Image (cartoon, grey):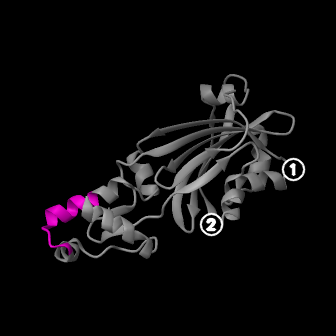
């Protein structure tokens, strides 16, 4: 634990993506065997501060961001204002039948279809969130030209302004695919966020589900009570 404490205090001297010295070198430095050194590094892995890459070493990860959640918060705009380079990469889109949850959340008729858009959010070129956006298929023409970037801004350019009206926050472990996409340990938790956004008339337009690295994000509810629709 003493070795872990020292290594933890030294992480600020590394940049995100840097690799720690090899375990052999660290064991020699601290005068312990490699098993003891590995247990110390395990503490940092469990905390989400570093990640082992097989055959390459132990990589330094970025640390927590406090993200304010309120009715007007928009992911890309908020993070850019905090000084981060925010990028949304389009992973795919499809038309499909709405799930019961989407039918209720978007006030759709039974057997309605939705447009599903999946994006990967990057902060300073590091993956942070996977987001699944669902819209009624009546927005097909508006969404046709979307090829990446802020979906909220894309909607605003098409004169559709949205605000958050419902937010549910949970936690779980990532799936193997999610862990690979987010470059994170398989055992570390992710935050799950289900959000409904509405237009100024109060009509639900978007239901999104995000999977966010819990080692990077803390959500701060800044104002008002938010209720499930």
- The residue lying at 83 percent from left, 47 percent from top is 161
Which contiguous range is marked in magenta?
Answer: 30-42
Query: Looking at the rendering, which quadrant does residue 30 occupy?
Result: bottom left
Residue 159 has which mark?
1
Residue 217 location in percent, x, y?
A: 53, 52
How far across and down, in percent of the image, does residue 8 sit?
36, 65
Horizontally, residue 98 falls left or right of residue 32, namely right
Earlier in the chain: of badge 1 and badge 2, it is 2
Q: Quadrant of the N terminus?
A: bottom left
In the image, 148: left or right of 9?
A: right
Q: State the residue lying farthest toward the left.
A: 33
Mark 2 sits on what residue? Answer: 84
Q: Secondary structure at mark 2?
A: loop
Q: CA distance from mark 1 to mark 2?
A: 26 Å
- Which corner quadrant holds the C terminus? top right
- Tell me, yes or no, if residue 80 can be seen here: yes
- Assess disc 2: are there few (<14), some (14-19) or many (≥20) residues with their C-alpha within 10 Å of its C-alpha: some
Q: From the top left corner, tell me how far across and down residue 171 is, in percent.
A: 47, 39
| Residue 178 painted magenta | no
User: Vertically, is 45 above or below 19?
Assistant: above
Give the answer, above or below, for where 172 lies relative to 10.
Answer: above
């Amino acid at each position: 634990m003493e070795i872990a404490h020292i290594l933890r205090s030294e992480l600020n001297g590394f940049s995100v993506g840097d690799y720690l010295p090899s375990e052999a070198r660290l064991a020699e430095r601290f005068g312990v065997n490699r098993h003891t050194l590995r247990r110390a590094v395990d503490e940092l892995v469990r905390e989400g501060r570093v990640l082992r890459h097989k055959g390459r070493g132990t990589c330094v990860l970025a640390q927590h961001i406090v993200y304010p959640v309120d009715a007007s918060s928009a992911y890309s705009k908020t993070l850019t204002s905090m000084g981060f380079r925010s990028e949304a990469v389009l992973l795919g889109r499809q038309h499909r039948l709405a799930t019961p949850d989407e039918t209720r959340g978007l006030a759709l008729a039974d057997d309605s279809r939705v447009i599903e858009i999946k994006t990967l959010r990057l902060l300073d070129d590091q993956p942070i969130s996977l987001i699944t956006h669902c819209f009624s298929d009546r927005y097909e023409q508006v969404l046709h030209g979307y090829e990446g970037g802020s979906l909220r801004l894309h909607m605003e350019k098409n004169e559709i302004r949205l605000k958050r009206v419902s937010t549910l926050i949970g936690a779980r472990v990532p799936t193997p695919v999610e862990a690979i996409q987010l470059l994170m340990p398989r055992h570390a938790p992710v935050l799950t966020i289900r959000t409904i956004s509405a237009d100024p008339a109060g009509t639900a337009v978007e239901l999104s589900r995000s999977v966010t690295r819990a080692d990077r994000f803390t959500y701060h509810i800044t104002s008002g009570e938010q209720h499930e629709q």
